[in-house]
Image (cartoon, helix red, strand yellow):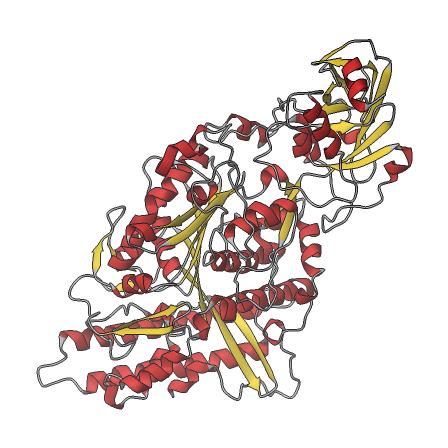
Amino acid sequence: MTIKEQKDSCFSGKILVCPLRGHWTSFRLVDEFGDGKPYGGLHYSVIDSIGQEYTGRLDGEGFAKVENHYRGPVVLIMDKRYNGLDQPYEQLIKREYYPLPITELQFRAEQTRFFHDDGFRREHNPAIKDADVFVQVEVRDLVREGAHLPPVVQRFHEPQSSLLRAMSELGIGPEVPFGIALSPNQHNVLEVRPMRALRPMLSTDDSFCALNLYQLALMATLSYTDFAQDPREKPLDKVRFPEDPSIGNLFGEALANYRENWRIDKHQRDRYYPLYEDVPYSKRLEILPFDPTLYAQNHPDKGKDQEHPANQHFFDDQKDGGDTQAFICHHDEVVLISVRGTASLKDAVRDVHALQVPFEEGVGRVHKGFYSAFQAISNFVRSYLGRFYVDQKIIICGHSLGGAIALLLAEALRRSTTQKYNILLYTYGAPRAGDSTFVEGAADLVHHRMVNNNDPVPGVPAPWMNANWKVWVPGLAMTVVSGYGLLVFGAGLVRVGGDPYQHHGRQQHFMPVSFNAKEWSAVLWDPDCESIEKAACTAMLEKTRQGDMPVRDGLLAQLINYTDHMMVASYIPFAWATLRRWQQTQETGASVVTEREYDVVDIALAVLKQKLHEYAQRVRYNEGPRGATKDESATIDALYKERDRLTRTRKRLQNLRYNGLTLADVYGSAAQSPEFTGSVERWFKHAENRRLEQYAMIPRQLDDGLRLARKPLDIDSIS
C-alpha cells in the first residue's frame, strides 16, 4: 500500500475513518541537573493527530503520561498564564504599557539555574538514561507569545521541529505554530533551558562606591555606540540586534542569553568586564518586546508613530537638527539612563555655546548649548518614566558633554512636581553646566563627579571669565570629537554679567603619584579645591610672562595631550584600577592612602598653596594708584578662597591616611545582594581582572624614610 493510500484510508480531513486509538506518550520536564521537581504541578495540554486535546498537570517529579490517544505524534503545549502574586511578575503582567504574557512555565524556568557557570548548554544530562527521546527546549518552544523571551541558543539535542512541520503540512495536529512534537509510544524527556539573565551589578546607595565608579564608566561609554536594531526602522514582524558592540546587542541579546560581553567600544582592545549578577530573566535590564499581533503600537500601519525597541530605548535627535544621544532601560530596582558625550560637529557647536540662559525647570542660569541638548532629550526621558517608573532608583551617567546634559536632566527630574524621583548621578570629565545660583539650588542632588588626572575639559567654561581668566584658564572650550581628533574653540566666551560658572557635585579625583622611574601608584580622593583638576591649565598659564594670555602654539601643545579625557583610554582603566585597589585595601584592612603616598601628595598641596598666595600678593602689588580694579579684586578674592579650600583639602587627605574601607565603600548596597559573592567570583575568573596593574597596587612602605616622589605630581610643575 502506498503512503497516499494509507493516508486516504485513515483520514478524512481531521476525522479518522477507523478508530486508531490505544497509543500512549509519556514525557517529563527536567532542569539542567536532571531534576523534574522545579516543574512539578505545571498544567499541560497535549494535542494528538486529529486535534483531540488532553490536559492535566505534571506530577511532583515533572512527569505525565497521555494514554489512549490517536495514532501518530502528539504536540505538547504549556501556555497557561502565570497567576501568582510574586513581584515583579504581577507588575509586569498587569502594567498598562507592554504587559508581558508571562506563563507558569516561564516563572518556573526563571527559578532554575545553569549547570555550567557560563550558561553554556550541558551536553550530557543525567536524565538521558531514562529517556527514549531526549531534547533540549526553550520556554519559547512551548508557548504562544515569545517576543519578550530570549533568542534560542544552539543546542546539542534539537527538538523534532521537522516532525511538527510535517504534521502541519499534512493537516493533522494543532492549528497553532508552536509546541513540541513528542514521539508516540515512547518516553520523552525535555530539558528546559533555565531562564536566567545577567545584569550589571549596581549600588542604589547614595554614597560613592568603587563598584558604581567602574560600572557606570562602562555604561557611559556604551552610550557612544549605536542601538543597532535590525531593521532600524519600520520593522514588520520581529527585530534583532546582531551588531556587537551595541546597546541593543548587549541588553537585548548577550545579557538576555547569559553571555558576558566585555566590548562597549568598537575600537576597544583591552577587556573590561562589568560585574554581572545572575538574576531571573524578568529582572534583567529590559528591552521591550516587539510583537505587532500583541501590541497595536508595534503595527507597521502606525507609520511614523510605530513603536519599536529602538525608538523607545534610544534617543538621537539628528533628524531634528541635533545630535544628542542617550539610552534608557530598567529593571525592578533601577532605571538606568546614559547620555553620550561629544561625538560630532553638532555636539561641538553646543559645547562652545556658553551663553548663560535661565534654567526654567529650577533656579539659576545654565550653559545654553548644554541646556538645548537637555531640552531635546527631556520629553523622551519623561515619557519613558511615565510608562515604566515604579519607584526604582534612577541612576544617570554621562561623559563630557553627556555629563553636563545628565546634570541638567537629573536636576530637572529631582524638581518634578508630578513625581518624587530618587536620583543618583555619576559624571566623568564633565564641564561646568550652571552658575553658582544653579549649583546652590541643586545642592540636594546626589552627584559624584569624576575627574581623571589633568583632564582639561572640567576646566571649562571658566568660572571667572570676566575676572581672573588670566589665572585659571583662557576663554576656550575644548572638544574631543570621535574620529576627527581634537577641535579647539577659543574667543568669544567671556561672560558679561551674571553669576560665575561653578561645578556641581562631590569631586572624585584620580591622581597618579610617581615615586621613582620604576615605582608609582594612584590615589582616588575628593579634594575640595578645583586647582587639582585644572593643574595642566594652571601650569600653562604660569609659564607665560606676567600672566598674559598664552601663545596659541603653546596652548595647543598643552591641550593635545587630551587622553586624560578619553573613556576607553583613561577613565575606564582608572576606574578599574580604583576598584582593584579598593578591593585589596578592604581585604587587607589597610588605609586608603599609605603614609608614603600621604607625604607625596601633602607636599604637592603645600607647594600649590604657596604659589596661590604668591600670585595673590603679586596681583595686589600691581594695583594702580587708585587701588585694585573690580577685576583685580575679584581675582584676589578668588585666589584666597581657593587657598582656604586647599587647607580643607589637606585635612581630608589626612583623614584618608587613617581610614580603612568596608565592603559598602567598595560595593555599596550591592554587597547585600544574595548574588554578591557569585558575582565577584565570576568577575575574578577572567584573567584580565587578576592581572598586576601598577596603578591598582598599594605602594610598599619604605623603612629608610625615603617617601618623597621624584616628581611630586603634575601640579608641582607650576613651581
Horizontal and vertical percent position of residue 303: 37, 36
Furthest toward the top, the residue is 18
Q: From the image, which quarter does the N terminus lie in?
A: top right
Front position in the image: 416 or 585: 416
- Residue 707: which quarter of the image? bottom right
Q: Answer above or below: position of 62 versus 261.
A: above
Front position in the image: 223 or 546: 223
Count every numbered label the image shows and give the total: 0
Quarter occupied by residue 51: top right
Classify residue 281 by image quadrant: top right
Q: Is residue 338 above or below residue 553?
A: above
Query: Outermost residue, right direction?
Result: 129
Residue in view at x 34 percent, y 75 percent: 643
Asked if residue 353 lies left or right of residue 137, the reply is: left
Residue at (54% x, 45% y) in the render: 240
Drawn side of residue 611 relative to residue 14, left or right: left
Image: 679 above or below 400: above
Q: Nearer the viewer, residue 51 or 417?
A: 51
Tell whether 386 sits left or right of 135. left
Q: Is residue 614 visible?
A: no
* Observer-nearest of 702 and 29: 29
Q: Residue furthest bottom?
A: 545
Q: Position of residue 719 (x, y in %)?
A: 38, 88
Report x, y in % for residue 103. Answer: 64, 27
Residue 483 appears in the figure: yes
